[in-house]
Image (cartoon, rainbow, N blue to C red):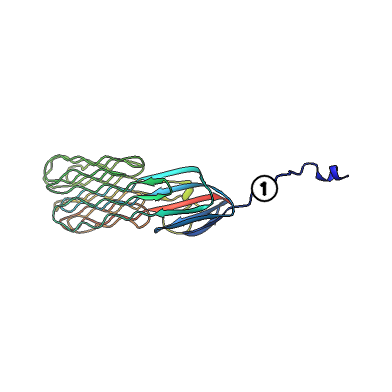
Amino acid sequence: MIGAITAGISSTPAPPAAVVTGGTLYTGGGYNYRVFTADGTLGVSVGALTADVLVVAGGASGGAGAGGGGGAGAFRTFSSQSFPIANYAVVVGGGGAAQTGTNARGNAGSTSSINSLSCVGGGGGGAYGVNNGNSGGSGGGAGSDGTTGTGGAGGTGGNAGGNVTANVELAAGGGGGAGAAGSANSGTAAGNGGVGSSSAISGGSTTGAGALSGGTYYFAGGGGGGVNGGAGPAGTGGLGGGGNGGLGATGRSAGTANTGGGGGGANNGNGMAGGSGIVIVRWAV
């Protein structure tokens, strides 16, 4: 009788579900998410956690003075990561500060990380007189001073910035994005920022902001290139939080917070700030 009752019952009990703290909790689509929009701590207690992780670094600012668009922060996903019981430091990289100097490259974005998983920040956009964009997670677009210029190289999790060719209107290249390189200038028109990338880990919106409620988030778009006067138009920011470039000081915008988007390039003293990054941890309910 006892054998019949216990047949098919494992003698080893199932492990307890992990208790996870830190960041902001969202639940949807069969998953829990812990979303970090600022530095914090992921706490795992009771049971070990296996989770997927999205890490996006801070985007760079655009160049000032025929400024290239800022490169997006690197964007990386890590599947089936093991987190034994412990506390794990989470660092959310800040966006590169707005460039207020005269004819100066944009400032780099900062690294985002959790445990040993990390991404580097975007490279600043070039500018008049310093021309080439800086390398980074995604590279900054080249600034223009009437000569050819080269966009910065992209690293793991990003793409190169756009180049420029000699032109009289001083139109710059777009910053690189996670999904595509920034585009080069075309005649008097500045280059656009490269499109970002989406991740199933992130849940749902087209900007990377808001509750995780389904759909598709995009992160890490490059900043648009600026035009130092002349006909324009300035470049547009890449989908995923990239800021628009400016026609002189008009129409420019910063990268969107917590997307890792690059800031738009513009005229002297107006290279726009990059967007801060984000870290998301996802596990099955």
User: In the drawing, does residue 168 fall left or right of residue 265?
Assistant: left
Kind of residue sitting beneath label 1: Ala
Name the residue: 53% across, 48% down.
84
Q: Secondary structure at mark 1?
A: loop
Count of all numbered marks drawn on residues in the image: 1
Give left or right: position of 204 versus 69: right
Q: Is residue 96 visible?
A: yes
Q: Identify which residue is drawn at 25% across, 53% down.
A: 61
Residue identifier under label 1: 14
Query: In the image, residue 21 lies at what x, y percent?
Result: 51, 58
**Residue 137 image offset from top left, x and y in percent:** 32, 44
Q: Position of residue 207 (x, y in %)?
A: 39, 54
User: On the rendered image, what quadrant is the N terminus found in?
Assistant: top right
Which residue is outermost to the right?
A: 1
* Crowding at mark 1 (Cα within 10 Å: few <14, some 14-19, many 20+): few
Q: Quadrant of residue 249?
A: bottom left
Is there any visible trace of residue 205 in the rendered image? no
Which residue is nearer to you in this view: 160 or 230? Answer: 160
